Amino acid sequence: MPYELIDIGTNLTHDSFDEDRDEIMQRANDAGVSRMIITGSSNQGSLDAVNLAETEPGRLYATAGVHPHHAADFDDRSADLIRELAARDAVVAVGECGLDYFRNFSPRQAQLAAFQSQLDIAAETAMPVFLHQRDAHDDFVEVLEPMLPRITRAVAHCFTGEHESLREYLAMGLWIGITGWICDERRGAHLHDIVSAVPDDRLLIETDAPYLLPRTIQPKPKTRRNEPAYLPEVLRVVAEARGQTEEHVARITTENAIRFFAL
């Protein structure tokens, strides 16, 4: 019997799922992934995420926000849309929002402004916030930290950082989302070594599908497309790295997701 798991970050509206979305959701269910949170990362993406989530209430949920890659498009209408979506039952967090200086698809000033605006909305609406940070640690902390007293809960989604940033995030009260990055012996070995530093009550797991296919899956899938049904592999590697049973990690991450998103 598979464990009951919650995928806290999956891009289910991604066009790579257009041909077989129903099968993807069925496979997730069969693998014990009973609930999924669909990431909203642009104006249209957030609308699509919410509309999909509303087709299966209680099983699918969504976030509403603008990813730093799309920050150049963030304007008053984006802010109004996020507020409007946040009032809908299916929406459980503001985001994905934050800073990404690795790609710099949007100018840094636009990223900083969009990030601040979404943190303000999270504070106003008393919604948790779903965060993204890549190669922008110092600015990210500088914007986020003063806002935290006004924000209910915040998760560092797809955490891939080093021990120092993990310590800092935990000290700030952030929750930590771990993806299949931890299953990558080339890029994620350090994560394997530090994930045990995350307290039981602040650990969350996610696939970030269709990205970040766990490299440890056996037999290897035919394509590199990740899907929520592979969340148990993230669970397995996280449990092993933490020296805990899969059953324990399944239980705490599911309880944490229910608490974090008020499901």
Image (cartoon, rainbow, N blue to C red):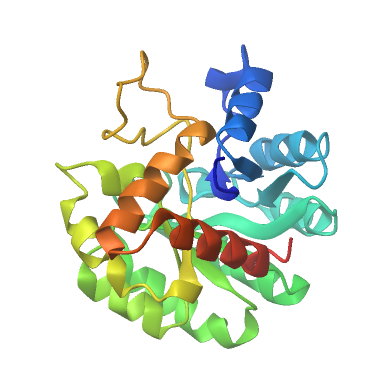
Q: Nearer the viewer, residue 46 or 31?
A: 31
Can residue 12 be seen here? The reply is: no
Residue 137 in the image, given as x and y percentages of width and height: 31, 67
- Measuring from the top left, give residue 106's x and y in whole percent: 43, 46
Q: Picture coordinates of residue 210 (x, y %)? A: 47, 30
Would you identify the image quadrant in which residue 191 lies?
bottom left
Decide if residue 216 is on the left or right side of residue 186.
Answer: right
Asked whether, in this view, residue 195 is left or right of residue 99, the answer is: left
Residue 5 percent across, percent down from the top left = 57, 49
Image point (58%, 59%), residue name:
254
Toward the front, the furthest residue is 1
- Compared across the picture, whether 150 is left or right of 234 comes to right
What residue lies at 67% left-to-right and 60% top-to-bottom?
93
Write the residue at 32% across / 79% down.
Answer: 168
Q: Is residue 231 above or below residue 93?
A: above
Relative to the observer, which residue lies in front, 75 or 68? 68
Q: How many marks?
A: 0
| Residue occupying image coordinates x 52% and y 66% | 252
Residue 125 image-quadrant placement: bottom right
The foreground one among 29 and 89 is 29
Residue 244 visible: yes
Position of the C terminus by quadrant: bottom right
**On-image quarter of the N terminus:** top right
Left or right of 199, for residue 204:
right
